[in-house]
Image: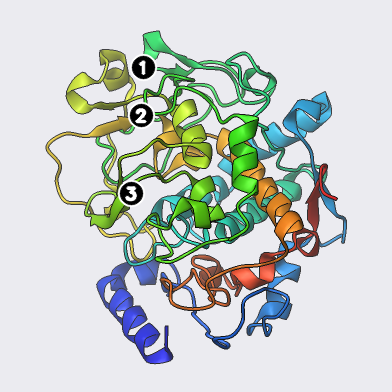
Amino acid sequence: MDARRFDRLTQALATRQSSRRAALGGMVGAGLATILGQNLVTAQDATPAMGEMMATPALTSPTGKVTVRKNGSAMTADEKEAFTDAVLQLKKTESPWTPPLSIYDTFVLWHRDAFDCALMAAHMGPAFFPWHRVFVRLFELELQKVHPDAFVPYWDWTVDQGKDAYLWQDDLMGGDGDPEHGYTLSTGPFRRGEWEIKIFDFDDRVRNPSIIRDLAGSHLTPKLPTPQEYEDALNIATYDSPPWNALAPVDKSFRNFFEGWRDCTDDYCDPDVGMQTTCHGPHPLHNGVHLWVAGEVVLAHEVPAAVMEAATPVASPAASPVATPGAEAPTPASSASILGTMAANSSPSDPVFWMHHSMVDRTWSTWLQRHGKTYVPVSGAHFGQNLNDYMWPYQSIGLNISPAMVMDSLKLGYKYDTDE
């Protein structure tokens, strides 16, 4: 994107979001796109973008310690307690970026609003991996402010696939939803009454304040990914391909193959939800894990009475001063979709999101080790998706960071227990 086009877009966003900008300290809901050359094809070859020297230290530990992210199945009792306690504390601590929201709910807000059609920051595009890498690392650093030894463990869902696996026990994520109470969570540290959801999807008209899970209940994805499906993804040597969205051919796009879009025919802007895609195939790998945890999707007239009774009507987040720029109020809907929490755009409201996306990020590390630190496109995709584009919302909190800057997790201060 050239500078004039970027200026026009940011001016349009600023105009339509003027009241929200005042509430958020004047941030603009877009990343600064910087095109540094048309012949760059790998991160190693890329000329460092402006702000690189500032951005990378912001994602490392102030102590210089390298965090080792472990398989959740190998965590000690103390490590589980440090992780869950720190998550609970972030839920209670006011955000320095979006008060009066908590730090935890700010991350939920960012993830939800990243689906905004004008932003398209985090999904259905090449920046899927780098955007979530920064997202999880920032969260991990906040955890470490509470407990210096905390880290975001990964859930290897190719191995630990049962509904009774270690992560669904009371000392970590808690278990399955309770069907007698609308599939809301009643066990573990994030159970009903102990964990209150504050950020909801714009089209969620019920807005249950408790986590909803129906493990393995999804007709779209009744099974978790197999080791062979996982290996098939890693064997795709091309990072991504035109048209740089959910329509990219999966045999030529590791990113799209792993993100989980199949047989897609178009991208479109849904006025309630944000950027969406029409896909007729299955929902494997990343997308499938979200759906497997969440369970089925039902319409408002199918909602169990217990869910309706437990739901707390709240004002639309779109009318709230904490709604981020680029997130417009939804149009009225005749019926509401009630989602298992992990199926929503606000999926980080279920803390298992972090274990899932630590596994997603570990997968990118493995792919980079196998195929080299290669990223495309350099230009030509939606802003925020190109190699040297600054990504939203990180620039709005003073972190100028692009996909080119985050290709090496060790330079960000962490690695995985399986890294070479």
Is the C-beta separation of discs 2 and 1 under 8 Å? yes
Q: Position of residue 381 (x, y in %)?
A: 43, 72
Type of amino acid at the residue the image marks with label 2: Asn
Mark before the other along the chain sequence, 2 or 1: 1
Say which residue label 2 marks. 208
x 63%, y 83%: residue: 49
Q: Is residue 162 above or below residue 378?
A: above
Disc 2 on helix, strand or loop? loop
x 12%, y 37%: residue: 334
Say which residue label 3 marks. 264
Q: Position of residue 182 (x, y in %)?
A: 36, 16
Q: Residue furthest top?
A: 180
Q: Is residue 63 above or below residue 151?
A: below
Where's the N terminus, which quadrant? bottom left
Label 3 vs label 1, nearer the camera: 3
x 79%, y 38%: residue: 70
Q: Position of residue 152 (x, y in %)?
A: 70, 42
Disc 1 on helix, strand or loop? loop
Toward which corner of the image does residue 405 lie, by quadrant?
Answer: bottom right
Say which residue label 1 marks. 182
Does residue 41 appear anywhere in the picture? Answer: yes
Label 2: few (<14), some or many (≥20) within 10 Å? many
Left or right for 168, reference 246: right
Residue 38, labelled with which disc?
none
Give the CA distance from mark 3 to mark 1: 32 Å
Label 2 vs label 1, nearer the camera: 1
x 32%, y 54%: residue: 320
Type of amino acid at the residue the image marks with label 3: Cys
Left or right for 88, reference 123: right
